[in-house]
Image: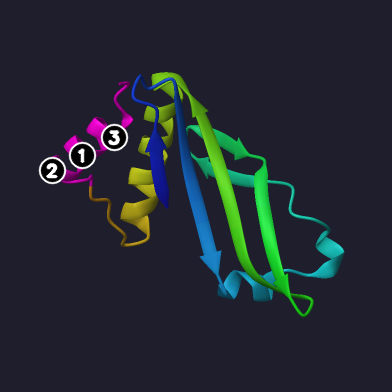
Amino acid sequence: VRLKRAPDGTVSTATFIWNKSKMFADLEPEMGNVQGMYLIDEEGVQLGKDVRCTYVDGEPTKMTARFVMYGQQQWDRFMRFMERYSKSHNMGYSPPSAASAAALAAVAAPK
């Protein structure tokens, strides 16, 4: 998952990328097209509709889903979901180091 935030926090995106995942084996033609990415937990459902699939020789090889959040409240909700998901799937999150965050801020700052 790749996270991006506008410097003022008004818009954030989370991009999920799956390459040759075993989840593709579970897709059946009768299921129809992928309609979105549903992030479901005890707080409810978050829906991202920007989902794209790449096919090679008629077989899915890559899926990219982009989840857009507007404002601090949606960002906080997404981060709570990701924290719970990562714990339950033995995953982790590492924020960028102070040096890389400062470099990103310098690049993003208006001139």
Nearest to the observer: residue 55 or residue 109: 109
Pick whichever of labels 2 and 3 is earlier in the sequence.
2
The amino acid sitting under disc 1 is Ala
- Quadrant occupied by the C terminus: top left
The amino acid sitting under disc 2 is Ala
- For label 1, the crowd category at 10 Å Cα-Cα, with few meaning under 14, some 14 to 19 and many 20 or more, is few
Q: Residue at x 60, y 69 (%)?
A: 23
Measured in 3D between alpha carbons, the distance from the residue under mark 1 to the one under mark 3, in whole angstroms, is 6 Å
Answer left or right for 11 relative to 29.
Answer: left
Q: Is residue 105 magenta?
A: yes
Q: Which residue is mark 1?
A: 103
Furthest-bottom residue in this view = 57
- For label 3, the crowd category at 10 Å Cα-Cα, with few meaning under 14, some 14 to 19 and many 20 or more, is few
User: Residue 79's x, y, as percent?
Assistant: 37, 37
Measured in 3D between alpha carbons, the distance from the residue under mark 1 to the one under mark 2, in whole angstroms, is 6 Å
Residue 36 vertical placement versus 21 (above, below): above
Q: Residue at x 47, y 37 (%)?
A: 13
Q: Residue at x 78, y 70 (%)?
A: 28
| Magenta residues, start to end | 95-111
Which numbered circle lies on residue 99? 2
Q: Nearer the viewer, mark 2 or mark 3?
A: 3
Evaluate if marks 1 and 2 touch, with contact meaning CB atoms under 8 Å apart: yes
Residue 106 vertical placement versus 62 (above, below): above
Query: Secondary structure under badge 1?
Result: helix
User: Residue 104's x, y, as percent?
Assistant: 26, 38
Which numbered circle lies on residue 107? 3
The amino acid sitting under disc 3 is Val
Residue 20 vertical placement versus 99 (above, below): below
Evaluate if marks 1 and 3 touch, with contact meaning CB atoms under 8 Å apart: yes
Nearest to the observer: residue 50 or residue 106: 106
